[in-house]
Image (spheres, grey):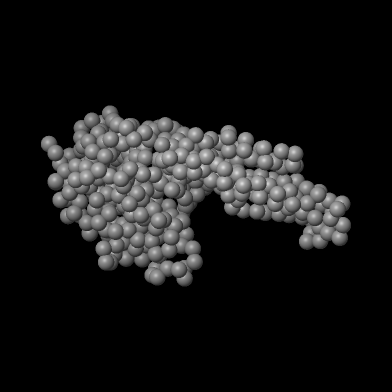
Amino acid sequence: MDKTNEILMLAEKYKDFTAQNLSKLIKAISMSGKEKEAADTLTKQMKENGFDEVRTDPLGNVIGRIGSGRKILAFDAHIDTVDTGNIENWISDPFSGEVKNGYVYGRGSVDQKGGAASFVTAGRIIKELSPPEDLTIYFVGSVMEEDCDGLCWKYIVEEEGIKPDLVISTEPTNLNLYRGHRGRIEINITFRGISSHGSAPERGKNAIYMAAKTALKIKELNERLKSDIFLGKGSITISEFISDSPSLCAVSDFVKIHIDRRLTQGETEENAVEELEKIIEGIDAKISIPYYEGIAYTGLRYGMKKYYPTWVMPKNHKMVEKGINTYSKLFGSEPEIGRWTFSTNGVTINGLLDIPVIGFGPGNEKMAHAPNEKVPVDDLVKASAFYSLFPFNM
């Protein structure tokens, strides 16, 4: 039996419920590694709405479950946020969670607690309509994404042993259907010079000059990186430059530059490093890829290399087609198919672990990390409807 109309009616009926749940999540301030209050809030919301099981794993991810079937579907919403930045750029309290004029306001409303609030409502609707018998649905409020994309899902799959047949990312898509994004890799280059007294620089070997020449070549490299018709162009930029010397009256003998490299289709860790090796050839410099090791709010220490692979789902993949079909049933037209500009947990879920991922989320990604972040309440309603109907299309 087609449940489309019933789901649309229920998603609209619970409009205020969804908005208020999001407001509560926004008020629970939750920078990366400090998500406990938000995790407790989301746990309470899931339990109050009849989820079959709700638990927190040792990393702090909130995992709600409905059903116990053979096929596994998971929804992902990271519950950590970035900080506010310059508070003077905000018109109102970033953590007010105010609901007015058809929006919910505050840090995390778009990136990306709106997805979590929407899937709580979806869980309530699915329970009311009785979930498909052959399906297990996980609703994951993931942690530490802003510090290290995909770390949370590395833990869920490798340590918790949960490997879904499909993950729906609820990152903001402006209610379009997304199927990938560029990858990224963080790279350090360290330069070793030889110090000498600043009054006689010719006696030394200045690491700053070595790094400066390299920086200009990296700028030139950015202009010739390859492009992809769907994902766009690869990019590279220097995001940090640190130097040291025995004193301010001495030639610098050490520099470290930190590089943000965005990888388009076909670009990998190996070729990104090779490009830089050619640039530093003949220079006393060393390339390394940092290792992230964070401490979760639970106290658990966990990490991974800071390489986040590019990923793209084929447009004709059956799960993409199911997403298109779900959208069309609900809204009477086909969705725009797109990709994120930024990076998501998909880098691990699909990029490293090859689990299919599609994206559908409330809000415009342009609001992510921006002051005066807000999400339309109507977006939350439509996202709730999509998350509710999709399991019946599996």
Q: Quadrant of the C terminus?
A: top left
Q: Quadrant of the N terminus?
A: top left
Answer with the quarter of the image where residue 51 lies.
top left
Q: Nearer the viewer, residue 172 or 337?
A: 337
Residue 5 in picture, x, y percent from top left: 14, 46
Answer with the quarter of the image where residue 197 lies.
bottom right
Q: On the rendered structure, is 281 left or right of 82?
A: right
* Furthest-top residue in this view: 70
Residue 177 at least partly seen: yes
Residue 77 in picture, x, y percent from top left: 36, 47
Residue 28 at least partly seen: no
Residue 295 in picture, x, y percent from top left: 52, 47
Check the image and report above or below for 16 versus 63.
below
Residue placed at 32% from the left, 58% from the top? 375
Residue placed at 27% from the left, 58% from the top? 377
Residue placed at 62% from the left, 53% from the top? 240
Residue placed at 22% from the left, 45% from the top? 333
Q: Nearer the viewer, residue 184 or 131?
A: 184
Q: Nearer the viewer, residue 195 or 50?
A: 195
Residue 82 in picture, x, y percent from top left: 46, 56
* Furthest-left residue in this view: 1
